[in-house]
Amino acid sequence: SVADQLTLINSMVSDTANHTPATFQQLTGFQANGFPSLGSWLSYGLGNESDSLPTFVVLPDARSMPSGGAANWSNGFLPAEHQATLFRAGSEPIRDLFAAEAVSVVAESDARALLGKLNQSHAKLRSGNDLLHARIRAFELAARMQTSVPEAADIGGEPAWLLDLYGVGQPETDDCGRRCLLARRLMERGVRFVQVYSGGAFGGSPRHGWDSHENCHVDHTREARRIDLPIAGLIKDLKQRGMLEDTLVLFTTEFGRTPFAHAPAGAMGMGRDHNPEGFTTWMAGAGLKPGYAYGKTDEIGWKAAENPVTWPDFHATFLHILGIDHERLTFYHNGIERRLTNVHGHVIQEILS
């Protein structure tokens, strides 16, 4: 079963109960804006496997961006080429990838040749300008993506049974199912890190997301229905293709919910507040003990009571599984050898196979 493939960490802790800084810490190791995301560090550390697709792709929930927006997948102070590429929902994953009007093959070829010469001349006069060189490479990659992205994003050739496995075509699961299937197709084609979001910064009351201060049973049941089948489908698909052996799946959240009720004005007391003191994440795939649970909270599920795991510990373990020593993956910035794990972090050896 899918559950047998999961490695649970039941004793995660975070340093803040506020959405945006907690989301930043989950993804960058720091609560402040301006630090590189996991995918950017991986792009910097391992490089690109494909010359026609980006190294790091983000697939947001069709309903909303996450709290903090694009800062969650920023390259921070790393070279600009390590910024994520956003694939949106719909028939055009990357906006403005194609010209508004058709251009002949000869005219396009001549234009690109001329543009290449102009870019080379422009770059020679501005050596050391990282943003300029990254932009030139980005546009060159975008030209190649005019062929690679439509092919990767076209799931029409997938068999009906596989679409059913991901929940594609079903109202509740179609959005997440398409993104999970696209994630698999991108990884098959050399994309190193794909980030699939569930929920976002919806606002309002009720919030229609995981941030249920009003009624956890209603809200979480609805959100779980959107993602359970697609995520299970992804793991089953990776397993049957032999990809799970060298693909690491992470399922994380910025914090958990309290075990006691939280009742904002006008609510019925069926919701729960933010809880960074003890919550669960899971991993699956490469190098992990499947069907294994690590750490515990107290008897009411409030605070981590056994083997607490910090985000630096989680990130150090993530990098270790992918063959990277978190203490050696550094980038010199403003007088500091920066790391994803700052000056902290220990690999959780007990969850490794």
Image (cartoon, rainbow, N blue to C red):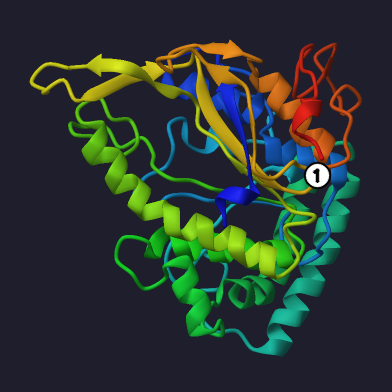
Residue at 48 percent of width and 83 percent of height:
160
SS under mark 1: loop
Q: Which residue is drawn at 50% across and 32% down?
A: 253
168 on left or right of 59: left
Coordinates of residue 129 in the picture (x, y in percent): 82, 37
Question: What is the residue that sits farthest to the left in this orientation?
Answer: 266
Residue name at image x 59 percent, y 75 percent: 150
Q: Quadrant of residue 312?
A: top right
What x and y, as percent, mark residue 158?
A: 56, 81
Q: Quadrant location of residue 342? A: top right
Query: Residue 107 location, x and y as percent?
Result: 69, 84
Residue 282 appears at what percent x and percent y? Answer: 59, 37
| Badge 1 amino acid | Gly
What residue is drawn where x is 29% and y is 21%? Answer: 272
Determine crowd level at label 1: few under 14, some 14-19, many 20+ residues with C-alpha closer than 10 A: some
Does the image show residue 324?
A: yes
Asked if 121 appears above or below 133 in the picture, the reply is: below
Q: How many circles with numbers are drawn on the protein?
A: 1
* Residue at mark 1: 287
Q: Is residue 12 above or below residue 148?
A: above
Task: Work out whether 77 lies above or below 163.
Answer: above
